[in-house]
Amino acid sequence: MNEKKKYITLDSGVDFRGIARIMSDNSYKMNHATARNQVIQAMNNLLTNAGRRLGVELSPERLEELLKKQDIHDSLVDVLWTAHREILAEEKKDIDAKKH
């Protein structure tokens, strides 16, 4: 079986080398492979927990298959961006409340 290897890409943002550089610059020594492994592990946990909440048990093989899908990564970007905006809105709300 000679399957062409696919790489997950993002339209914009920081790649694994960039993440590793940011972490290292902030005193958390990291290389790009470790950054990738951390992101994949976090996504694995997220998908596992989401599956449980939805009543779906995902096998390790199915999780691995899902983690290789571009649309999963694209969707995660949307979820994280939405969460980021909501956190910023809450912080602004807290600051405004303290002013009054």
Image: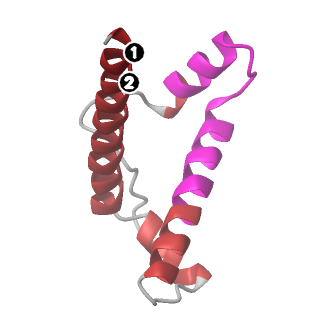
Q: Position of residue 35 (x, y in %)?
A: 61, 37
Residue 92 appears in the figure = yes
Give the residue drawn at x 35%, y 65%: 69
Q: Which mark is residue 98?
A: 1
Mark 1, secondary structure of its residue: helix
- Which span is picked out in magenta? 18-44
Q: Left of 16 or right of it: where is 88?
A: left
> x, y (%) of residue 82?
27, 43
Q: Which of 96 and 60 is in front in this view?
A: 96
Check the image and report above or below for 96 versus 10: above
Q: Is residue 76 left or right of residue 24?
A: left
Write the residue at 39% across / 63% down.
Answer: 4
As drawn, 6 above or below 89: below
Element at label 2: helix
Callouts 2 and 1 close, C-beta under 8 Å? yes
Majority SS type along the magenta span = helix
Place residue 77 in its image quadrant. top left
Q: Count residues near mark 1 (Cα–Cα under 10 Å), then give few for <14, some for 14-19, many for 20+.
A: few
Which amino acid type corresponds to the residue marked 1 in the rendered image? Lys
Residue occupying the point 38% across, 24% down: 94
In the rendered structure, does residue 19 fall within the stretch colored magenta?
yes
Measured along the vertical axis of the image, is residue 95 above or below residue 60? above
Query: Marks 2 and 1, Cα distance to the nearest angstrom?
Result: 6 Å
Position in image of residue 1 (x %, y %): 48, 79
Badge 2: residue crowd in 10 Å (few <14, some 14–19, many ≥20): few
On screen, 45 above or below 94?
A: below
What residue is disc 2 on?
A: 94
